[in-house]
Amino acid sequence: MKVKDITQIIEDWCPNAYAEEFDNVGLLVGDQNTEVTNILIALDTLEETVNEAIKKQCNLIISFHPIIFSGLKKITGANYVEKVVIKAIQNNIAIYAMHTTLDNSIEGVSAKMAEIIGLKQTKILIPQQKTIKKLTTYVPLKNAELLRAKLFEAGGGSIGNYDQCSFNTEGIGTYRGNEDSHPTIGTKGQMHHEKEVCIGLIFEKHKQNNILKALFKNHPYEEVAYEITTLDNLNQQIGMGMIGELSQPTDSLTFFNHLKETFNLSVIRHSNICKKTISRVAVLGGSGSFAINHAIKAQADVYITADLKYHDFYKAENSIILADIGHYESEQFTKNLILDYLTKKIINFAPALFTGQIILSDLNTNPINYL
């Protein structure tokens, strides 16, 4: 398998269309047509990570955090970012980063945190907006059923727990082709009336290319009239953070001890313990101060995240417990999540196509130490 084959599997799982605007995801270093020997899964791509890849004969590193966040104007090895890029290129090692595509996945970073804690009935804490689109088109009545079916096959008509959803209105379409037209129905130069169906269906924005390919391939008209609009619906499958319930209410001290044990924490920075028992828990891997009000609105008893500043803790206002467990600590299971998914999709289902190994990095890349 080539680098592009592996990255396509990743992007089918976590489409790059859902990365945050500030982020830099996808293939950052390397040739997409390179044959992959072995894959190294890491949380961060540092120089030590590249050395590990060389030692283990991996020519593709799949990293959660991107080593390149902003544009490089020169690559001289003057800092740790440039050193990584130079060493990777010298050793023909490709680097792919996921980051907020995995943060925004319903099976992503926060979902893994929720699983480790043992939360049930989980759902996304901050569903994304502006990621659901609607196609409206007009097709002859006799072709409507086939076109709908093909649009459904392309991923259209799905929302939440429902699929093959559409709205259809019958009417009369009129048109007249000029001397350069080649109408499939009717005669050029003559006004034509056709019984048509106006089909409207929704789709997730990363499926737009497939939707349009299916539309143009299966629509009978020479010129296809259509429009695509962006809806305000919340996308319950895409977004930041998770919220869920414990199997049974637990007193706060017992819950925090459970948190320290499962995440191997030496310390938890937290706001006032204003809840005697914990039932409803919100989580968000990495820097999550922006979601404090969302956790409060969702009536969470505790919100677990990282990188909270001094004044962030005041936002609890005795209505929620804020718990900062550390950036690395909150995301430490992410590389296991990536490994498990790729093992299932490549090793278990396509062993003949990939003869290499998918290897979990042994490195602890946490830059913060505790005394």
Image (cartoon, rainbow, N blue to C red):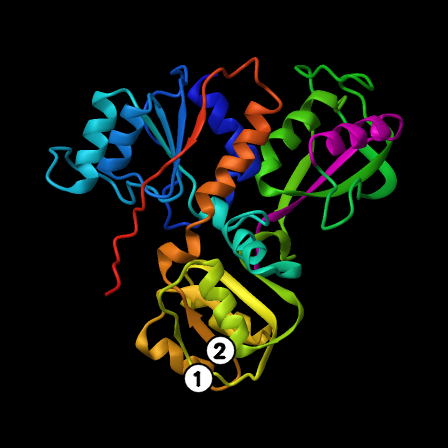
Contact between marks 2 and 1 (CB within 8 A): the answer is: yes
Report crowding for label 2: few under 14, some 14 to 19, many 20 or more residues within 10 A (C-alpha): many
Q: Quadrant of the C terminus?
A: bottom left
Q: Residue at x 44, y 84 (%)?
A: 272
Q: Amino acid at mark 1?
A: Asn
What is the spatial separation of the Cα atoms under label 2 and label 1, in whole angstroms?
A: 6 Å
When the figure is inspected, residue 311 is found, relative to residue 347, above or below; the finding is below
Q: Residue at x 75, y 34 (%)?
A: 152
Residue 18 coordinates in the image, percent (x, y):
51, 45
Residue under pointer 2: 321
Residue 369 coordinates in the image, percent (x, y):
25, 59
Q: Which sits in the foreground, 80 or 257?
A: 257
Q: Residue at x 80, y 32 (%)?
A: 148
Q: Is residue 19 visible?
A: no
Q: Quadrant of residue 328?
A: bottom left
Dot 1: what SS? loop
Residue 302 coordinates in the image, percent (x, y):
53, 73
Q: Is residue 54 left or right of residue 261?
A: left
When the figure is inspected, residue 4 is found, relative to residue 128, above or below; the finding is above
> Tag count in the figure?
2
Q: Which sits in the foreground, 338 or 219?
A: 338
Magenta part of the chain:
126-155
Q: Amino acid at mark 2?
A: Ile
Residue under pointer 1: 272
